[in-house]
Amino acid sequence: MVVAAQRPEDLFESPRSVDVLDRRLIFRLAPRSTPEMLESIPGVVVQKTNHGGGSPFIRGFTGQHVLYMIDGVRLNNSTVRYGPNQNLNTVDSFSIRRLELLRGPGSLLYGSDAIGGVIYVLTRNAPYIPGARLRWGGEALTRFSTADTSQIYNLGAWTQLHALTVFAGGSFKDFDTLSGGRGIGEQKWTGYTEGNYDGALTYHLSGNWAIKMAANGTRQYDVPRTDKCSYTDCRHYRKQFRDLAYLKLSGRAGRLLDRFDLVISYQRQRERRDRRRLDRDRIEYENDLVHTVGLAFVAGTNFGKYSNLSYGLDLYYDRIASAQRRESLSTGEDLATDPISFRGRFVDGSQYLQGGVFAADTISPWSWLRLRAGARLAFAYTEIPPDPLAATYGLTQERISDTALGFAGGLSVTFIPTRKLRLIAGVQRSFRAPNLDDYSHVGSEGGGFDVPSPDLSPEKATTFELGVKWACRLLSLSAFGHYTMLQDFIARQFTGYEVDGEPATQRVNTARGYVAGLEGKLTVRLPRRFYLSGWISWTRGDLRMEMYTPPTQPMRRMSPLQGMVAAGYRRHRYWAEVAVRWSARQDRLSPGDLADKRICPNGPDNCTGTPGWAMVSLSGGVRMGRYTDLTLRIENVSNEPYKYHGSGVYAPGVSAIALLRVHK
């Protein structure tokens, strides 16, 4: 596990709250998508606006406040949206070798956005055995589900020729209409198609050094925005594309250079959105293209218990092309009668540069005490050309050039009274620099219509944690409490006028508040290979914004009390499990929640929020010979109609899933 320290460390010894999904567990989960894979992790709520989305909430945060990393490269760019987004769904779940999730701040190691947590993905590559001359292998995987009559096919092949290893793979996915639970039935505007690719070429140099070239990407087509679709007005993500390519040099040379990783990356993300409006006889096309060039360097020096130092730097540059076009549905003619027709969601040609340097050290002055401390200095520079829409909203038409500085730091103290017990206390300082979505986003979002917000400063958060970890032959326990103080939090406020039939909203640094919570997980290993496991999570958060009455209001989409209990059996070739995932009602709603039709479909008056629910699932698997594995799951046995708080689509009703994997 590397996510909590930027270097390999044991999960039990880490002073942070972390979970890891390896490839074997991923196959047992048989996930449809990467976001849905996270539903098995304690305390994570995956909000889904549509079937092609999935935005994980970690300790009450999502979107711009949760950082995604792929093989040491930031997936987040400067256009990541204010609320839930579908970016993690562009990572193929079956290309993942290991996924690590850090709960709580990660700005010290990773920079901006990592206030709520970090999701760190490591993709698959070819296995390597030093000295081997010629080896080869591969895998073929297929998954079927009755909930949306979906089909997933994944292939991967690898070879080793002396010091060179090569891997190539890809997926094809087809999702039909999703059926919900009892009384819900088929949910219109939920199907779409997807393709993925991944590959890596690694040359192993002398000693412990290697140079790697890798690429991965996704193509999603015709993904409906389910909560924004009707027969007269429907929005689609016609094209959701992502491509990442990188070159990585890694190795080690004794204690002075215990770890060395240098990554140069290029990433391209394209989002094409269409909105068909029969009542206005027009179709609106929006297209955003983001080019990102990145550099990341991480190294380590190990002097044993006296010092285990990690240090590094990172730098990412974004350039955005954004455009919008409108045409008549009846005649096909271009419509350009108002200023908004000449401007996309962002100002075309906008640029964003961010980076920082960090250092973190772990020392053990005594056998019963371990200390970890570190700091990061960071910056973000924004360059936005004159906005053609500025005069429309009474804003300055001048170019925006802004530099934001950020500081992150942390201190963790681990007490080791026995070999099996760890007592942990820590404090973390994190930040998020305003991005292009904050400054210049224009369009329908959440409960209103965003207009540009030129005067913003970084958000800051201070998190206090207390935790305990216990591990022995029969029992594993982890429990953490956390309290985060928020300063200069960016929130939407209504401007008092309407745009395109929706209330106009602008973002300001007006909010301060807190998020507090408890999370715990337990596994009991019983005789004869049986086990019991479970987890529980609770969060609560408030923001103080003077524009509301009363000024202190709940945070948006805050997750309710939730948990899971499971009982199972495992041995070498067989496994089986029954699990109950549950959630309490969430009726503690913010003004934004009350205006959100995903939460209050009949309006804010008499809105009761999101009902509580409990969902039973059965799963099992068998290894059929040396090269074949089969996983079977029955989800939502009682056909419960439920959805995660804030979602625009209901979760599947009673359904069967089968995953067959053949490998060598």
Image (cartoon, helix red, strand yellow):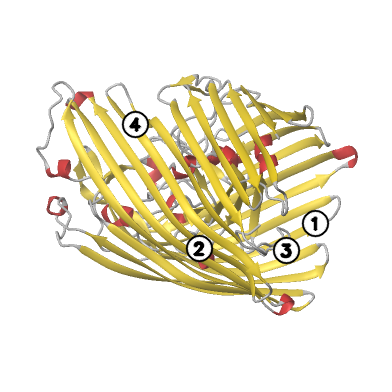
Instruction: State the SS at label 2.
Output: helix
Does residue 183 appear to the left or right of 487 in the view shown? right
Q: Earlier in the sequence, mark 3 or mark 2?
A: 3
Please report contact status of discs 3 and 4: CB closer than 8 Å, yes or no: no
Please name the residue shown 17% across and 54% down the image.
387
Disc 1 and disc 3: Cα gap in Å?
11 Å
Q: Position of residue 460 (x, y in %)?
A: 44, 66
How many residues crowd around disc 1 within 10 Å: few (fewer than 14), some, or many (20 or more)? some
Towards the viewer: 391 or 261: 261
Q: Please name the residue that numbered disc 3 is placed on.
A: 13
Q: Which of the labelled discs sits on residue 471, or is there none?
A: 1
Which corner quadrant of the image does residue 447 belong to? top left
Q: Please name the residue that numbered disc 2 is placed on.
A: 110
Quarter of the image with the C terminus in it? top right
Towards the viewer: 361 or 590: 361
Please name the residue shown 39% across and 40% down the image.
241
Which corner quadrant of the image does residue 353 belong to? bottom left
Q: Earlier in the sequence, mark 3 or mark 4?
A: 3
Residue type highlighted by circle 4: His
Q: Which of the labelled discs sits on residue 236, or is there none?
A: 4
Please report contact status of discs 2 and 4: CB closer than 8 Å, yes or no: no
In this rendering, the label closer to the viewer, 1 or 4: 4
Disc 2 and disc 4: Cα gap in Å?
33 Å
